[in-house]
Image (cartoon, rainbow, N blue to C red):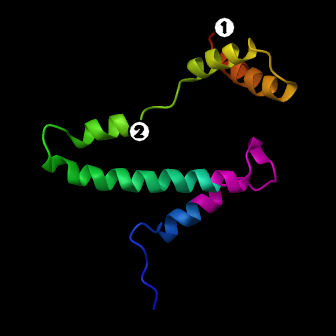
Amino acid sequence: MTTQHPITPTPELVQLLRNEAPQGIRDAGVTRELFLITAAYRAGADAELEACCKWLPKLPPWSADDLRKHRRPKPPSLKEQALAALSEADQGLNKSEWQQCSNTIRRALEQLDD
């Protein structure tokens, strides 16, 4: 009989990730494999973080909220992404690289009020 590792994802999480993963070869610009790898990486990191947060209150003055804030920083805003893309575009890009930058800038501009 095989003993299951304690950080094995639940069957519900596995099914959720399967359902959310893109189906096409290049659906939404990301491969299914890359989506699942990224999702698994995040799920494992989140499980590790939650385990640390349970342990952390025993060691003042830190709190679990402090740990979450520092270990899971917010991703850059669309504005920050667009500014970074514009900086990259100034460095001279090939057509494919420029397309990615222009898509980011376009998404940011579309969110602006008229």
Circle 2: element type: loop
Circle 1: element type: loop
Q: Is residue 111 visible?
A: no
Q: Which residue is mark 1?
A: 114
Figure quadrant of residue 16 = bottom right
Amino acid type, mark 1: Asp
Stretch of the chain drawn in magenta: 17-35
Q: Position of residue 45 (x, y in %)?
A: 44, 51
Front position in the image: 29 or 113: 29
- Classify 10 Å Cα crowding around label 2: few (below 14), some (14-19), many (20 and above): few
- Classify 10 Å Cα crowding around label 1: few (below 14), some (14-19), many (20 and above): few
Looking at the rendered image, the disc whose residue lies closer to the viewer, 2 or 1, is 2
Q: What residue do we see at 73% from left, 23% from top? A: 101
Classify residue 84 as left or right of residue 76: right
Work out whether mark 2 precedes mark 1 in sequence or the reverse, and give the earlier one. Answer: 2
Q: Position of residue 55 (x, y in %)?
A: 22, 54
Residue 26 counted in the magenta span: yes
Q: Position of residue 4 (x, y in %)?
A: 43, 78
Q: Residue 72, labelled with which disc?
A: 2
Q: What residue do we see at 29% from left, 52% from top? A: 52
Q: Residue 57, labelled with which disc?
A: none
Amino acid type, mark 2: Arg
Front position in the image: 21 or 6: 6
Q: Assign the C terminus to one quadrant of the image.
A: top right
Residue 63 counted in the magenta span: no
Q: Position of residue 39 (x, y in %)?
A: 56, 52
Classify residue 1 as left or right of residue 95: left
Figure quadrant of residue 72 = top left
Looking at this rendering, what residue extends furthest in the right direction?
95
Looking at this rendering, what residue extends furthest in the bottom direction?
1
Rounded to the nearest angstrom, the CA distance separating label 2 from label 1 is 34 Å
Q: Assign the N terminus to one quadrant of the image.
A: bottom left
